[in-house]
Amino acid sequence: MAHYAVSFRRSAEKDLRKLDAAPRRRVLRSIDALVLNPRPVGCRKLYGSENAYRIRIGDYRVIYTVDDDILVVAIERVRHRREVYR
């Protein structure tokens, strides 16, 4: 099984830096797991996009895209659930 590379948009990096230490660790652990399985159990495909997904980590959501041709998971947003879809 091939491993995917993970890349972050600059805005997603900023979102991560804004999180407290404990939620940041949980989010990063979940993002690290995307390397082996970019579509884990519980992920949801977002409507209106061909390759955008979200994973739920407590009150936080990670929005990302998957490119199976070049094996890249691109993290788009990491925010609280009330802010992520705006």
Image (cartoon, rainbow, N blue to C red):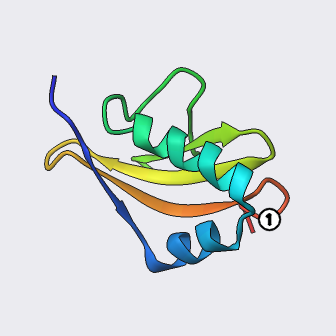
73 left or right of 1?
Answer: right
Quadrant assignment for the N terminus: top left
Name which residue lies at 79% across and 65% down.
Answer: 83
Name which residue lies at 62% across and 60% down.
Answer: 78
Toward the viewer: 78 or 64?
A: 78
Asked if one can make out residue 48 in the rendered structure from this viewpoint, the answer is no
- Please say if 8 is above or below 72: below
Instruction: Report how many numbered discs are placed on residues in the image.
Output: 1
The residue furthest front is 21
Disc 1 marks a residue whose amino acid type is Glu
Asked if one can make out residue 60 in the rendered structure from this viewpoint, the answer is yes
Name which residue lies at 41% across and 47% down.
Answer: 50
Q: Residues within 10 Å of mark 1 (few under 14, many from 20)?
A: few
- Please say if 55 is above or below 17: above
The residue furthest right is 82
Residue 45 x, y percent position in the rendering: 53, 38
Quadrant assignment for the C terminus: bottom right
- Please say if 84 is above or below 25: below
Residue 19 x, y percent position in the rendering: 71, 65
66 left or right of 76?
Answer: left
78 left or right of 29?
Answer: right
Residue 46 x, y percent position in the rendering: 57, 45
Q: Mark 1 = which residue?
A: 83
Q: In what element is the residue under mark 1? A: loop
Name which residue lies at 53% across and 69% down.
Answer: 12
